[in-house]
Amino acid sequence: MEKPPRLLLSRLWLQNRVYDVTLNSVVFAWKEAEPNKKRAPGSNWNTGKAAGSHGVPVCEILAVQETAEDSHKKNVGKWHRVPKRPEESYQPPAFTVFYAERTRQHRWRCSSVTFHCPDWGLCQQWVHTIEEQLSLLTSRPKRLLVYINPFGGKQQGKRIYEQKVAPIFSRASISTDVIVTERANHARDHLSTDADLKNYDGVVCVGGDGMFSEIVHGLISRTQSDSGVDQNCPEETLVPCDIRIGIIPAGSTDCICYATVGANDPVTSALHIIVGDSQPIDICSVHHNNTFLRYSVSLLGYGFYGDLLTDSEKKRWMGPTRYDFSGVKTFLSHHCYEGTVSFLPATDSVGSPRDKFKCRSGCHFCQHSGHLPFENQQICEEEEEEEEEEEEEDSVSESGRKDVWRVIRGKFLAINAVSMSCACPRSPKGLSPAAHLSDGTTDLILIHKCSRLDFLRHLLRHTNKNDQFDHPFVEVHRVRRFRFTAKHQEVDSELDLRETGKGLFGQICRDHPACGCAAGHSTWSCDGETLPHTAIQASVHRQLIKLFARGIEDQPVFEDSTGVCSA
Ligand SMILES: CCCCCCCCCCCCC/C=C/[C@@H](O)[C@H](COP(=O)(O)O)NC(=O)CCCCCCCCCCCCCCC
Ligand SMILES: Nc1ncnc2c1ncn2[C@@H]1O[C@H](COP(=O)(O)OP(=O)(O)O)[C@@H](O)[C@H]1O
Ligand SMILES: [Ca+2]
């Protein structure tokens, strides 16, 4: 590949050693000019191939500034390798470049390097030229609207933002308006009606998956109402949201952050926001008949995860450990639930949930997978309903494509639909390790009735390398739409859930220990919120929102465009 033209080349000092420092539009690099001299061990950083050679992609430079004011003495984030200054009072002209550095397990941190120049003119030339290159990076946000949930996770959201994130934003000259929420749905309501979104290049969510869900609901609702789209219509094609969302993890599960960045680390997330990353994300809309219920980004779960969540809500005071406590309790109760799942498999999708390879940064599947128009799917669905077949039902859509709705009746311990892997610290590979972030599909995981021991074996496989789908009682399908109806609703279809309410069904549940599965029903948990209906239909909307993320990187790879840069 042809090297971009060099913009600057100077011989400068770094820690009393002489370096040849270069800048082109892609890489800022420095190489020791006298490499044979004895050097302190461990002086390479992550991109160093040869000892004394270093490079930073321009797109990962956070800021540059003249160092006369001795900026590195300020308490800005967690800076590393603070350069030594000459002892004498005379301060030679110097500039500092702040950049994102990769460390272990997909974490990034702030780093900096300070070069001393022979004169101020050269120093200013470096600062201006680097600033000029940064100003060409148009995907970087300048103004952000930040929502902090002070009660998420371990109630550290405000502290995390103030101590770890705000200083880095300020270093990168990002201006922010910060709203600390005062009640649940404060952020959602503000975004869906009041917020003047034209003033911002992005929205930042400091909290967990539940808080992120609020932001998503606010933004999607706002976008649809601005475009005259009716969210209550399940077949409606929704309008994608323009504005990107950044997640600063400060919740209990933080799976959306973990599954899109590879770590749940506030500094890493802040750096992905600053460099202006963009990762589209699939969203699943959930309806009950023609009533919109919620959007799901991570886990839409019935049975095990629904019951677990319902129980854990009463234990919010426990913080994140409420999930482990309720997990054990729900596991021991071992309820299964009878019902019918029907789904439209993503037959035109090239991927499968059993694939060995995973969705990674720049994923080819996500970029190229298409999606069926809703009209075609609707035709198939109606034919399926008329025929009332139990097994598979085929039809040919108007486009000539063969669409297949499948219907599965059974007794389930869990029904999980995940539009992304749902990787999180509890399960680093997630509920569906090969799920894609933005391919327009969701992985539907059905755990049929089985023994406690078998279910435990299945759960344990979420924490090790074994395949959690390789059990006779587990099936997994990659789908575009699905429906669920609980057994009791099939028997008495006239029953109106809206009138009878959750209280009555709670009673039915307790009255019928669900080991027999005949009458009990569970609750759907949707990204940590419970849904008021058990009969639902869900549709995936491909790439409806965008995050300040880039997906999980396999191995950091840098272009070697100066002959200095490396991996
Ligand atoms: C035996 C160990 C089994 C470990 C199984 C771990 C599977 C974990 C999969 C987690 C998927 C998470 C999907 C994300 C959901 C979130 O959107 C959502 C909201 O998050 P927020 O509170 O941050 O706002 N979070 C949740 O719904 C919570 C899911 C919690 C999963 C914890 C599971 C613990 C299971 C423990 C079983 C113990 C069996 C022990 C038998 C002796
Ligand atoms: N100021 C607030 N007071 C009470 N609840 C809030 C507030 N702000 C947000 N919430 C709600 O708190 C819930 C949990 O938030 P989240 O940040 O996801 O934490 P966690 O991961 O611990 O569940 C969300 O459903 C959100 O709507
Ligand atoms: Ca997906």
Image: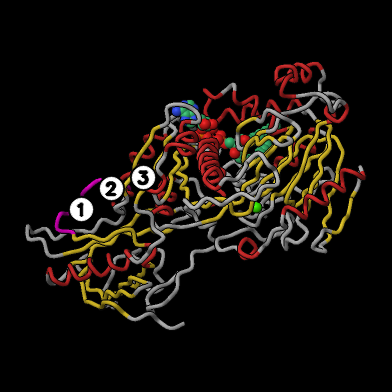
The residue sitting at 65% across, 57% down in the picture is 439
- Was residue 77 drawn as part of the magenta stretch in this picture? yes
Q: First in sequence: mark 3 or mark 2? A: 2
Count numbered badges in the picture. 3
Q: Are marks 2 and 1 in contact (CB under 8 Å)?
A: yes
Q: Quadrant of residue 408?
A: top right
Q: Which residues are magenta?
A: 67-78
Amino acid type of the residue tagged 1 in the rendering: Ser
Q: First in sequence: mark 3 or mark 1? A: 1
Of residues 390 and 376, which is closer to you in this image?
A: 376
Q: Position of residue 415 (x, y in %)?
A: 75, 39
Q: Position of residue 120 (x, y in %)?
A: 12, 68
Q: Quadrant of residue 500?
A: top right
Q: Is residue 450 visible?
A: no
Amino acid type of the residue tagged 3 in the rendering: Val
Q: Is residue 233 above or below residue 337?
A: below
Q: Is residue 234 visible?
A: yes
Cα distance in 3D space between marks 3 and 1: 18 Å
Q: Report the magenta stretch's main SS.
A: loop
Q: Which residue is mark 3?
A: 165
Front label number (3 vs 2)? 3
Q: Mark 3 packing: few (<14 Cα in 10 Å), some, or many (20+)?
A: many
Residue that protrudes farthest toward the front in the picture = 228
Amino acid type of the residue tagged 2 in the rendering: Val
Of residues 281 and 60, which is closer to you in this image?
A: 281
Q: Quadrant of residue 332?
A: top right
Q: First in sequence: mark 2 or mark 1? A: 1
Cα distance in 3D space between marks 3 and 2: 10 Å
Query: Is label 3 in a helix, a strand or a loop?
Result: helix
Q: Which residue is mark 1?
A: 71
Query: Is label 1 in a helix, a strand or a loop?
Result: helix
Q: Mark 1 packing: few (<14 Cα in 10 Å), some, or many (20+)?
A: few
